[in-house]
Image (cartoon, helix red, strand yellow):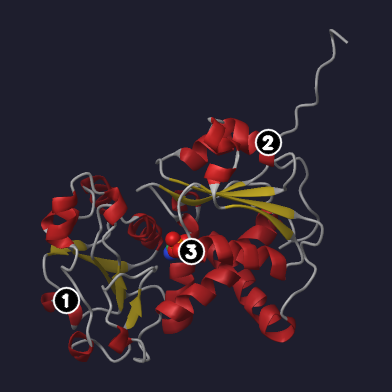
């Protein structure tokens, strides 16, 4: 036995038959929006559209029957966690839910690499949310099975950005030629970090509206500048609301502040009300990754431009598409 070498299995050992574009995602991790091309997005959105039709027609089907997803959440979540669960179950697969890591062996001090190497013995794909930037990439380094980043601290939230773009496309019918205004906590909001980067694939203008201490990180502004994206920063919404096609509102991320006085000084900085919506374009789309804690008044919910509840549903179809793709069944 001394010379015994355990088999070294790598990611993507086989290409599935059939669709070659889908095959390119087989066995792959989804860690950052930087990994996607415009062709990839066309493909993902096409599959998501098919998923939507299937859910509307038959609800649940057996595309991923026998496959298992491990949902590993070190931070709270309602939408991402439950939409991945729903996506897997609608595709006929099943889920190992670890939403309370304090009841897992993480509470005994188990490392992230060991935790993912454990879960991949039981599951075919692992979705991870973690408070540290780069945690998903670290997990992917150790895992043989695909890792999907469901938010790594203030880093990225790539599946959210994909569903955000799918929402914009579904609501407005195009992604080029738009003015997108991002509002709120642009410093700590990982959804806007991913969305801004993904928008570089399209011909858009981006406005950033935030309190001074919550501005979009310079590193991201610089990245987008290098790609030729026109960007402007503002501290009020008034100058841009009338020229905005997509208003993307974010929550001030209380949990990321080191100094709670700073949080108190900006927590109610922006609230979208019916009066503000009166100044917006008739076809503007109002989005929010949710949860909201007062940034959009409930009086706005009935406005047809308020897309944030539809946005969550689009997320189900995008996540169904991603699971099918990384498991070679798209
Ligand atoms: N948008 C989003 O990530 O929501 P959750 O934190 O509820 O998953």
Measuring 51% from the left and 35% from the top, which residue is drawn there?
138
Nearer to us in this view, 255 or 282: 255
Q: CA distance from mark 1 to mark 3?
A: 25 Å
Q: Estimate the x, y position of residue 236 in percent, counting from the top left.
A: 11, 71
- Identify the residue under disc 3: 162
Query: CB under 8 Å between callouts 1 and 3?
Result: no
Q: Quadrant of the N terminus?
A: top right
Mark 2, other Cα within 10 Å: few <14 / some 14–19 / many ≥20? few
Nearer to us in this view, 164 or 204: 164
- Identify the residue under disc 1: 240
Q: Residue furthest right?
A: 1
Q: CA distance from mark 2 to mark 3?
A: 29 Å
Q: Estimate the x, y position of residue 117 in percent, counting from the top left.
A: 66, 34
Seen in the picture, residue 202 relative to 244 is either above or below; the reply is above
Q: Is residue 227 left or right of residue 323?
A: left
- Identify the residue under disc 2: 118
Q: Tag count in the figure?
A: 3
Seen in the picture, residue 241 relative to 225 is either above or below; the reply is below
Secondary-structure class at tag 2 = helix
Secondary-structure class at tag 3 = helix
Q: Quadrant of the C terminus?
A: bottom right
Q: CA distance from mark 2 to mark 1?
A: 50 Å
Q: Earlier in the sequence, mark 2 or mark 1?
A: 2
Nearer to us in this view, 238 or 122: 122
Q: Is residue 93 left or right of residue 238?
A: right
């Amino acid at each position: 036995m001394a010379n015994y070498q355990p088999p070294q299995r790598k990611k993507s050992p086989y290409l599935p038959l059939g669709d070659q574009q889908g095959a390119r995602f087989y066995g792959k991790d989804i860690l950052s929006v930087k990994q996607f091309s415009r062709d990839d997005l066309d493909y993902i959105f096409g599959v998501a559209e098919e998923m939507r039709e299937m859910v509307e027609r038959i609800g649940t089907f057996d595309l991923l029957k026998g496959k298992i997803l491990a949902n590993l959440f070190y931070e709270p979540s309602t939408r991402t966690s439950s939409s991945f669960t729903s996506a897997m179950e609608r595709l006929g697969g099943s889920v190992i839910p670890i939403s309370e890591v304090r009841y897992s062996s993480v509470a005994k001090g188990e490392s992230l690499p060991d935790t993912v190497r454990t879960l991949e013995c039981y599951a075919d794909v692992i979705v991870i949310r973690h408070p540290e930037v780069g945690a998903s990439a670290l997990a992917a380094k150790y895992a043989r099975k695909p890792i999907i980043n469901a938010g790594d601290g203030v880093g990225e939230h790539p599946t959210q950005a994909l569903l955000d773009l799918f929402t914009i496309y579904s609501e407005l019918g195009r992604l080029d030629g738009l003015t997108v205004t991002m509002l709120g906590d642009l410093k700590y909001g990982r959804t806007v970090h991913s969305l801004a980067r993904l928008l570089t694939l399209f011909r858009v203008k981006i406005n950033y509206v935030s309190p001074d201490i919550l501005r979009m990180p310079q590193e991201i502004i610089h990245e987008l500048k290098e790609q030729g994206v026109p960007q402007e920063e503002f501290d009020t919404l008034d100058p841009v609301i009338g020229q905005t096609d997509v208003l993307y509102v974010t929550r001030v991320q209380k949990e990321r502040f080191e100094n709670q006085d700073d949080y108190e000084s900006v927590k109610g900085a922006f609230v979208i009300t019916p009066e503000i919506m009166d100044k917006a374009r008739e076809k503007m789309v109002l989005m929010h990754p949710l949860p909201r804690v007062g940034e959009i008044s409930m009086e706005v919910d009935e406005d047809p431009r308020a897309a944030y509840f539809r946005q969550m549903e689009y997320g189900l179809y995008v996540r169904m598409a991603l699971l099918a793709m990384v498991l070679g069944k798209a």
